[in-house]
Amino acid sequence: MLILCVIIGYALGSISFSTLVGRWFGKIDIREHGSGNAGATNTLRILGARYAILVLLADIAKGVVAVGIGIGLGHGNPWVTYLSGLAAIVGHNWPVFFGFRGGKGIATTIGVLLVVMPRSVLLAGLVAVVLIALTRYVSLGALVLTILTPILGIVLHSGTGKVWLAVAVAVLSIWRHRKNIGRLMRGKEHRVFSK
């Protein structure tokens, strides 16, 4: 059952809503514009807020659904749940349906962690939103969200398995944002809403 749930989670994650919205509504491949990232932030830059919100909500939803399937088919085995969610994030980042060129997985991560450890991710998300509002660096907010979530999980006694999932997600997020980290350190990172 674990393998089936992981496959389903990965397949769900591989539905790249940013790429699909770009094709359907903008008649473009979103990955060839802006940052080249298939995610809500690049959709905001290229297609505008209403399409970005659509992508954001859809990407969060596929994380929620993947975890829900893990819960339903895993018969209470928490690791089936965790790995189903992780597979959805991996699918978003490297989607089999779109040449393994996806996004950075933050919205899908939010969906997964909202089900698995809601208090931790909501508190981390609040800090991230404040940082984004102050700095307009979405990448900084995303990194803070993913790094702070496992720390809060420990503080709030969320459980060892959940914390390990959050740590894995944080490591994946740091890897996917490595170029952003370099630009942040050089003061050359792109700000949201900037030309």
Image (cartoon, rainbow, N blue to C red):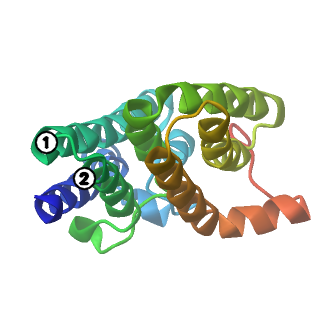
Examine the rendering and report whether any part of residue 132 can be seen: yes
Residue 20 located left or right of residue 46: left
Helix, strand or loop under label 2: helix
Residue closest to the eye, 156 or 101: 156
Q: Kindly identify the residue that appears in the image at 43 percent across and 56 percent down.
A: 38
Give how far apart the Cα atoms at labels 1 and 2 are: 9 Å
Examine the rendering and report whether any part of residue 27 can be seen: no
149 w.r.t. 79: above or below: above
Residue type beneath disc 1: His
Horizontal and vertical percent for residue 160? 50, 48
Q: Which residue is mark 2?
A: 80
Helix, strand or loop under label 1: loop
Give the quarter of the image for residue 1. Answer: bottom left
Give the quarter of the image for residue 167. Answer: bottom right
Residue 98 located left or right of residue 172: left
The circle on residue 75 is 1
Q: Kindly identify the residue that appears in the image at 46 percent across and 66 percent down.
A: 32
Mark 1–mark 2 contact, CB under 8 Å? yes
Circle count: 2
Horizontal and vertical percent for residue 117? 47, 33
| Quarter the C terminus occupies | top right
Horizontal and vertical percent for residue 150? 61, 45
Label 2 crowd bin: few (<14), some (14–19), many (20+), radius 10 Å: many
Residue 20 located left or right of residue 133: left
Residue closest to the eye, 63 or 150: 150
12 w.r.t. 110: above or below: below
Residue type beneath disc 2: Val
Horizontal and vertical percent for residue 44? 53, 39
Q: Kindly identify the residue that appears in the image at 30 percent across and 65 percent down.
A: 95
Residue 10 located left or right of residue 190: left
